[in-house]
Amino acid sequence: MKKSIIFLLVAVLLISVGCSEEKSKAPEPADPDEFAKQVVGQDEDNLIDKSSLEVISRVHSLLNNAVGWENSPSDKQVEQISEMIPEIEKIIEKTNYKPLKEDLERFLKLVDAARPNERDDWIMPHRIVHDIDHFLLGRSTKENTEYWGESEAVKTWMEMN
Protein backbone atom coordinates (compact mmCIF):
# COMPACT_ATOMS: atom_id res chain seq x y z
CA MET A 1 0.00 0.00 0.00
CA LYS A 2 2.76 2.41 0.98
CA LYS A 3 4.69 1.68 -2.26
CA SER A 4 1.53 2.34 -4.30
CA ILE A 5 1.02 5.73 -2.68
CA ILE A 6 4.66 6.72 -3.20
CA PHE A 7 4.50 5.54 -6.83
CA LEU A 8 1.29 7.51 -7.36
CA LEU A 9 2.82 10.68 -5.85
CA VAL A 10 5.95 10.37 -8.00
CA ALA A 11 3.84 9.79 -11.11
CA VAL A 12 1.67 12.85 -10.41
CA LEU A 13 4.78 14.97 -9.82
CA LEU A 14 6.41 13.81 -13.06
CA ILE A 15 3.24 14.39 -15.04
CA SER A 16 2.76 17.89 -13.60
CA VAL A 17 6.38 18.84 -14.33
CA GLY A 18 6.19 17.40 -17.84
CA CYS A 19 2.93 19.20 -18.65
CA SER A 20 3.95 22.66 -17.55
CA GLU A 21 5.26 25.09 -20.14
CA GLU A 22 9.00 25.65 -20.01
CA LYS A 23 9.94 28.91 -18.32
CA SER A 24 13.33 30.08 -17.18
CA LYS A 25 14.09 31.13 -13.64
CA ALA A 26 13.21 34.79 -13.26
CA PRO A 27 16.17 37.13 -12.78
CA GLU A 28 16.13 40.09 -10.44
CA PRO A 29 14.51 43.00 -12.28
CA ALA A 30 16.78 45.82 -13.35
CA ASP A 31 16.48 49.32 -11.99
CA PRO A 32 14.51 50.90 -14.86
CA ASP A 33 16.18 54.28 -14.45
CA GLU A 34 19.65 52.75 -14.59
CA PHE A 35 18.67 50.68 -17.61
CA ALA A 36 17.23 53.73 -19.38
CA LYS A 37 20.48 55.68 -18.81
CA GLN A 38 22.42 52.91 -20.51
CA VAL A 39 20.18 52.30 -23.51
CA VAL A 40 19.14 55.75 -24.62
CA GLY A 41 21.28 57.60 -27.12
CA GLN A 42 23.88 59.88 -25.57
CA ASP A 43 24.67 62.34 -28.34
CA GLU A 44 22.12 64.95 -29.33
CA ASP A 45 21.81 63.73 -32.92
CA ASN A 46 20.92 60.24 -31.77
CA LEU A 47 18.79 60.93 -28.72
CA ILE A 48 15.88 58.85 -27.51
CA ASP A 49 14.50 59.43 -24.07
CA LYS A 50 13.14 57.07 -21.44
CA SER A 51 9.56 57.79 -22.50
CA SER A 52 10.39 56.41 -25.96
CA LEU A 53 10.77 52.97 -24.37
CA GLU A 54 7.15 53.09 -23.14
CA VAL A 55 5.96 51.80 -26.52
CA ILE A 56 7.36 48.42 -25.46
CA SER A 57 5.03 48.42 -22.44
CA ARG A 58 2.08 49.46 -24.60
CA VAL A 59 2.76 46.70 -27.13
CA HIS A 60 3.17 44.22 -24.28
CA SER A 61 -0.18 45.20 -22.75
CA LEU A 62 -1.88 44.90 -26.11
CA LEU A 63 -0.35 41.48 -26.72
CA ASN A 64 -1.36 40.34 -23.22
CA ASN A 65 -4.96 40.94 -24.20
CA ALA A 66 -4.45 39.55 -27.70
CA VAL A 67 -2.84 36.20 -26.80
CA GLY A 68 -3.55 35.79 -23.09
CA TRP A 69 -6.26 33.44 -21.86
CA GLU A 70 -6.05 31.43 -25.11
CA ASN A 71 -7.13 34.42 -27.21
CA SER A 72 -5.98 35.13 -30.75
CA PRO A 73 -5.24 38.65 -31.99
CA SER A 74 -8.09 40.30 -33.83
CA ASP A 75 -7.57 42.33 -36.99
CA LYS A 76 -8.05 45.48 -34.91
CA GLN A 77 -5.35 44.46 -32.40
CA VAL A 78 -2.96 43.65 -35.25
CA GLU A 79 -3.67 47.08 -36.72
CA GLN A 80 -2.95 48.72 -33.33
CA ILE A 81 0.37 46.89 -33.09
CA SER A 82 1.20 47.94 -36.66
CA GLU A 83 0.60 51.56 -35.72
CA MET A 84 3.29 51.28 -33.01
CA ILE A 85 5.94 49.86 -35.34
CA PRO A 86 7.41 53.28 -36.31
CA GLU A 87 8.07 54.00 -32.61
CA ILE A 88 9.81 50.65 -32.24
CA GLU A 89 11.84 51.30 -35.39
CA LYS A 90 12.93 54.62 -33.86
CA ILE A 91 14.25 52.78 -30.79
CA ILE A 92 16.09 50.32 -33.04
CA GLU A 93 17.64 53.18 -34.97
CA LYS A 94 18.67 55.24 -31.97
CA THR A 95 19.48 52.96 -29.06
CA ASN A 96 23.11 52.26 -28.23
CA TYR A 97 22.25 48.96 -26.50
CA LYS A 98 22.83 46.34 -29.20
CA PRO A 99 20.94 43.45 -27.50
CA LEU A 100 17.79 45.60 -27.26
CA LYS A 101 18.16 46.56 -30.91
CA GLU A 102 18.47 42.87 -31.87
CA ASP A 103 15.48 41.85 -29.72
CA LEU A 104 13.30 44.52 -31.30
CA GLU A 105 14.45 43.60 -34.81
CA ARG A 106 13.54 39.97 -34.06
CA PHE A 107 10.21 41.13 -32.64
CA LEU A 108 9.43 43.06 -35.85
CA LYS A 109 10.36 40.09 -38.06
CA LEU A 110 8.06 37.83 -36.08
CA VAL A 111 5.23 40.37 -36.15
CA ASP A 112 5.68 40.83 -39.89
CA ALA A 113 5.31 37.08 -40.43
CA ALA A 114 2.47 36.64 -37.91
CA ARG A 115 -1.08 36.13 -39.15
CA PRO A 116 -4.10 37.72 -37.48
CA ASN A 117 -6.19 35.21 -35.55
CA GLU A 118 -3.26 32.75 -35.36
CA ARG A 119 -2.38 32.73 -31.67
CA ASP A 120 0.77 30.62 -32.06
CA ASP A 121 2.30 33.23 -34.40
CA TRP A 122 2.03 35.87 -31.68
CA ILE A 123 3.34 33.98 -28.63
CA MET A 124 7.05 34.56 -29.29
CA PRO A 125 6.70 38.29 -30.05
CA HIS A 126 4.70 38.56 -26.82
CA ARG A 127 7.39 36.77 -24.81
CA ILE A 128 10.14 39.06 -26.13
CA VAL A 129 8.37 42.28 -25.11
CA HIS A 130 7.10 40.66 -21.89
CA ASP A 131 10.65 39.93 -20.69
CA ILE A 132 11.89 43.41 -21.67
CA ASP A 133 8.90 45.12 -20.08
CA HIS A 134 9.01 43.21 -16.81
CA PHE A 135 12.73 42.83 -16.25
CA LEU A 136 14.23 45.97 -17.80
CA LEU A 137 11.48 48.56 -17.81
CA GLY A 138 10.27 47.98 -14.26
CA ARG A 139 6.88 46.28 -14.58
CA SER A 140 7.88 43.13 -12.72
CA THR A 141 6.24 42.53 -9.36
CA LYS A 142 6.55 39.76 -6.82
CA GLU A 143 3.13 38.55 -7.96
CA ASN A 144 4.19 38.46 -11.60
CA THR A 145 7.68 37.11 -12.05
CA GLU A 146 6.99 34.98 -15.12
CA TYR A 147 10.18 34.96 -17.19
CA TRP A 148 10.38 33.34 -20.61
CA GLY A 149 14.09 33.87 -21.30
CA GLU A 150 13.39 35.17 -24.82
CA SER A 151 15.15 38.54 -24.60
CA GLU A 152 18.89 38.78 -25.21
CA ALA A 153 18.70 42.31 -23.82
CA VAL A 154 17.53 40.95 -20.46
CA LYS A 155 20.10 38.13 -20.43
CA THR A 156 22.97 40.45 -21.35
CA TRP A 157 21.91 43.11 -18.85
CA MET A 158 21.74 40.56 -16.04
CA GLU A 159 25.20 39.22 -16.91
CA MET A 160 26.69 42.75 -16.91
CA ASN A 161 25.05 43.88 -13.66
Image: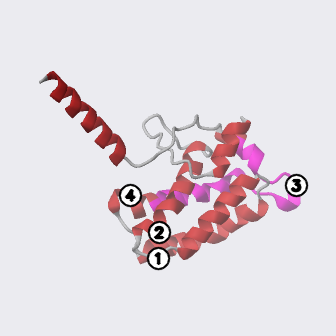
Q: Dot 3: what SS? A: loop
Residue 58, quarter of the rendered image: bottom right
What is the spatial separation of the Cα atoms under label 2 and label 1, in whole angstroms? Answer: 7 Å
Query: In the rendered view, would you say 125 is above or below 160?
Result: below
Range covered by the magenta-colored residues: 35-63
Whether the residues at callouts 2 and 1 have beta carbons within 8 Å, the answer is yes
What is the spatial separation of the Cα atoms under label 2 and label 4, in whole angstroms? Answer: 13 Å
Marks 3, 1: nearer the viewer: 1
Residue type, mark 1 in image: Arg
52 sits left or right of 70 in the view: right
Give me the disc on residue 115: 1
Residue 1, quarter of the rendered image: top left
Residue 44 among those drawn in magenta: yes
Query: In the rendered view, would you say 142 is above or below 131?
Result: above
Give me the disc on residue 43: 3
72 sits left or right of 110 in the view: left
Residue type, mark 4 in image: Gly
